[in-house]
Amino acid sequence: MHKIILTTYFLLGGYMIDKLINYGKIMVIPFGVILLSPIILSILNLIGVKTYDIMILIIMVITSLITGFFVGRKSDQKGYINGIVFGLLLTLIMFILSLFFKDKYGLETIIYYLIIISSCTVGSMIGIQKSEEKTS
């Protein structure tokens, strides 16, 4: 059994599997925010504070920037490519989850996903800059 695992590891490239494991660890941040933000916004609504869709967008942009920053810190080079890949992965997972809960998709949904991908990319570029400053 161990031979199969080691063979698969080397065939797929150990580097790629390590990257996927790192992405999985970082993926905890946005999904934790996605799970906690509706609870917090519901409590705010009960208190009487009006929450709007723009607040959800702002929360997701900040979360995407933070996770992109962590992706950039862990990447060796080309932070923008890692940020785009992570943003696409996050968007793909969110799209698959939204298939169960949402009826219609329109231009607003596409723009929302593009904003998430862009903020992951910007966060990753900032993260790689900070990691280069740290090593210099």
Image (cartoon, rainbow, N blue to C red):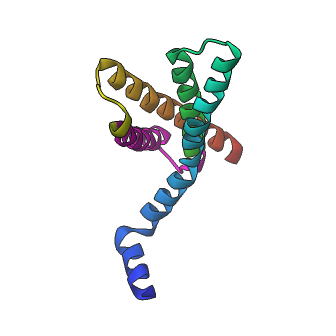
* Residue 111 makes an appearance in the image: yes
Q: Is residue 17 magenta?
A: no
In the image, residue 64 sits, relative to residue 75, either above or below, namely above
Residue at horizontal 51%, vertical 22%?
57
User: Considering depth in this image, is 36 or 7 the residue closer to the camera?
Assistant: 36
Q: Position of residue 105 (x, y in %)?
A: 29, 25
Quarter where residue 73 is shown: top right
Query: For the N terminus, which image quadrant?
Result: bottom left
Residue 10 pos. (x, y %)? 40, 75
Q: Quadrant of the C terminus?
A: top right
Residues shaded magenta? 72-98
Measuring 35% from the left and 31% from the top, which residue is drawn there?
A: 102
Relative to residue 76, is residue 66 depicted above or below? Answer: above
In which quadrant of the rendered view does residue 36 lie? top right
Q: Is residue 61 left or right of residue 47?
A: left
Q: Would you say 115 lies left or right of 41 here?
A: left
Q: Nearer the viewer, residue 48 or 57?
A: 48
Q: Position of residue 48 (x, y in %)?
A: 68, 12
Dominant SS type (magenta): helix
**Residue 128 seen in this snapshot:** no
Q: Is residue 79 magenta?
A: yes
Figure check: 75 above or below 16: above
Looking at the rendered structure, the number of numbered marks drawn on it comes to 0
Please state the horizontal and vertical placement of residue 116, each as a whole percent of the image: 45, 30
Residue drawn at x 50%, y 29% as measured from the top left = 119
